[in-house]
Amino acid sequence: MALNRISSDGHPLMFVQGNEACVQGALHAGCRFFAGYPITPSTEIAEGMARELPKLGGTFIQMEDEIASIAAIIGASAAGARSMTATSGPGISLMLENIGFAYMIQMPIVVVNVQRGGPSTGLPTKLSQSDTMQARWGTHGDFTSIALAASTVQEVYDMTIRAFEVAEHFSTPVFLLLDELIGHMREKVVLNKHDNQAVVKHAFPEIPPEWYLPYTESLDLVSHPAPFGKGYRYNMTGLVHDRAGFPTSIPAEITERLETLRNKILKHKREIWQLREYYTEDAKYVIIAYGSAARAARGAVESLRLKKTKAGLIDLKSIWPFPDEPIKEILDRCNIKSVIVAENNMGQLIHPVREMLGGSVKIASVNRYDGHPLEPQEIINVVKEEIYA
């Protein structure tokens, strides 16, 4: 991972792969604990953290499996360390129960999923976006997910930092959805674009330990339990619990806890939502995509524009909660004839798009799930079909 030169604004400029950019973003965000288990195509993240964390006084542990890995980063977060793991599809499947545990106890962690083809062992060295819905619904119970995404190596760096910001702000697990192509491709990255203090730091409790209730919500509904080992002892359980952290069977307390876990995210959706628009001002055909599919979609849009077809792109940087309101605001500005959802799977993101539009706009899809990236021409062909339909 070589430093090439300094950018015009004085920041280090590097030529790195996406997984290496994720390492740099995590370190810059203050991540000082990583536990993981090697799995293609995310292994370079573990290797990079193993190499760099000790230099900063941090800790890297290769665990015996993914279940132990997610448990370890939850424990590190409970002790006050910013912590992360990285894996791919089968590893995420093993982690999901403990991701639900982190959600219930309101523990901020970052989980990077460099997606590959599945189900089962699937396509370890090939790309996919088939974990899109897994990031939303994977863990059991009523679960409100936050998932971010990136379509360039620069965005991997930026969105890794963003993932820590969001996890800390909402005291909850955050997914960063990459894919094999984004994880392994190389592009230039400008580092240190963010303030070193970008990730929010929460005030330590100002009340005596004997008065402390770890799950007393702030005005934004978020609880920030004090780090273990600092004199504030409290109970931590995956059972539905009261404000003191002890299990409860009282209906009103159960309802309050589950609604708070949901509402602390959904009532602040606009703080999470991020997307990027290309040529949407006058677009009649709008493509919605993320990750490597968005790269292909941008190439398709630029080619279509050269041929006087008014195509545009909405490149999603946050997937869950689904950014329905900003997408509708964009589409309402346009004289839309058709929306095309481009995905490297059999059709997952298209479902919330259909739910959002409710039949008011014609929706088409372009899907590829053979382990190879979508090509711009495949998307162009679907747009042409819509033109002549």
Image (cartoon, grey):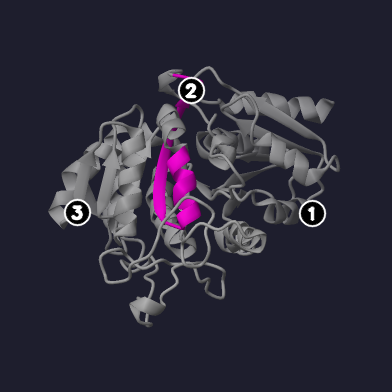
Q: Where is residue 171 in the image (x, y as percent from the top left)?
A: 46, 60
Q: Where does the C terminus fall, quadrant-wise?
A: top right
Tag 3 residue: 58
Instruction: Please provide the residue range marked out in magenta.
Output: 97-120
How packed mark 3 is, by other alpha carbons closer than 10 Å (few <14, some 14-19, many 20 or more), is some
Tag 1 residue: 332
Q: Where is residue 34 in the image (x, y as percent from the top left)?
A: 27, 46
Q: In this view, does 147 lie above or below 295?
A: below
* 63 to the left or right of 133: left
Q: Residue 182 carries which label?
A: none
Q: Which mark is residue 117?
A: 2
Q: Position of residue 64 (x, y in %)?
A: 26, 31
Residue situated in front as seen by the camera: 333 or 48: 48
* 246 to the left or right of 205: right
**Label 3 or label 2, whichever comes before in sequence order:** 3
Give the amino acid type for the residue marked by disc 3 in the picture. Gly
* 134 to the left or right of 360: left
Q: Where does the N terminus fall, quadrant-wise?
A: top left
The Cα atoms of the two marked residues, 1 and 3, are separated by: 48 Å
Q: What is the secondary structure assignment of the residue under circle 1?
A: helix
